[in-house]
Image: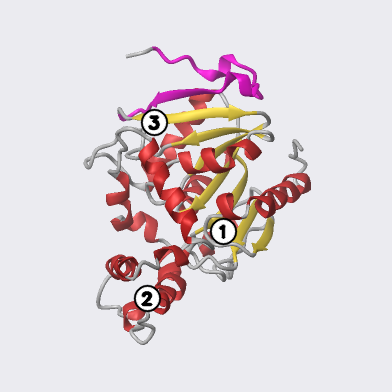
Amino acid sequence: MKKLVPLFLLPLFWSQSFAQSHQVPTSDGELLHITVKGNGIPCLYLHGGPGSGSWWMEKFMGEELEQHFTMIYLDQRGVARSSGTENSNYFMERLVKDFEEIREFLGIENWLTMGHSFGGLLQMGYALRYPESIRGMLMINTALHMQECFETSWCPKALEFSGKADELSLCTDTTSHFVDRWQQAVDLVKEENVFWKMGYAEEENMHIMNATFGEIPNWNGNMGNIVMNLTDYHINFKPLTSNVQAPVLFFYGRSDWMIGPNHFEGLAFPNMVLWGSEVGHMPFMEGREDLMQAIRVFLEAQELANF
């Protein structure tokens, strides 16, 4: 196997000309794909999905982000260019340990995390276990309680868009697990070809986004088939936000029906910038200017800015 050279041999804020990709070995034998690009304070990107990979963010918003951050784009285990089989360990404890092992590999003392969608759950799991590693969290259209997202936004909107608004029992039927009901709601909007309305302003953008999966050869899809059923990720993290001392940007979309435009309610981060935007679920594609403005305000408030 190719010998890996730890990046602590390079300056902490290295130039974009040193952009490089690595397969980082974990202590339990997986290889995690990371791409490191840009200038400024290190920032670990934690993608959503689960299983969507980091290429979305790198492709559609990397140019802006890499002017101000040293971005570490990670494909989580079992996703895209990282290893991971159906029998790999996908529990929260193991995934956040992956993040720590990447940080140590890169020789970074502490960093920001940037999470999207499902990535917010990972940010919380990481912050609660390794608070000393995190200088701040940028939470972009993130979920902090999956069941709430489904029952209060995803499901009722999916029924509305598919013309079945009178079948609300799908959203509240406690005799079946919310993950199973979620799949039924997904099937409904796909059958009616209205899935795009859940998170996009324009249908074409969904197709552009979906096409990026084909740009990564031999895409690993194991994680996405597993973690939705793990109870680690069904926790309501909202009450635990009061325990997070790191500064937080919570950016949400007022037309983001995948997470819910009111999902910010109940948050108790002691140091939070709350930013509502007229966007859907993919602001790095359909709302970059406002997202960058929110990031700028947050970093300047925390005296972390490199603008």
Give the x, y percent position of residue 36: 54, 28
Give the residue type that dot 1 points to: Thr
* Residue at the outermost left position: 87
What residue do we see at 34% from left, 47% from top? 91
Q: Nearer the viewer, residue 250 or 237?
A: 250
Q: Which residue is mark 1?
A: 241
Of the residues under marks 1 and 2, which one precedes in the sequence? 2
Of the residues under marks 2 and 3, which one precedes in the sequence? 3
157 with respect to 179 (left or right): right
Q: Are marks 2 and 3 in contact (CB under 8 Å)?
A: no
- Determine the secondary structure under disc 2: loop
Q: Is residue 48 visible?
A: no
60 with respect to 24 (left or right): right
Q: Which residue is mark 2?
A: 162
Q: Which residue is mark 3?
A: 32
- Determine the secondary structure under disc 3: strand
Quadrant where the image shows the N terminus: top left
What residue do we see at 27% from left, 43% from top? 222
Quadrant where the image shows the C terminus: top right
Q: Nearer the viewer, residue 243 or 283?
A: 283
Give the residue type that dot 3 points to: Leu
Mark 1 residue crowding within 10 angstroms, few (<14) / some (14–19) / many (20+)? some
* Residue at the outermost front position: 204
Kindly report the distance in space between the C-alpha atoms of the residues bearing marks 2 and 3: 39 Å
Q: Nearer the viewer, mark 1 or mark 3?
A: 3
Residue 16 falls inside the magenta stretch: yes
Kindly report the distance in space between the C-alpha atoms of the residues bearing marks 1 and 2: 35 Å
Part of the protein shown in magenta:
3-28
What residue do we see at 47% from left, 45% from top? 47
- Determine the secondary structure under disc 1: helix
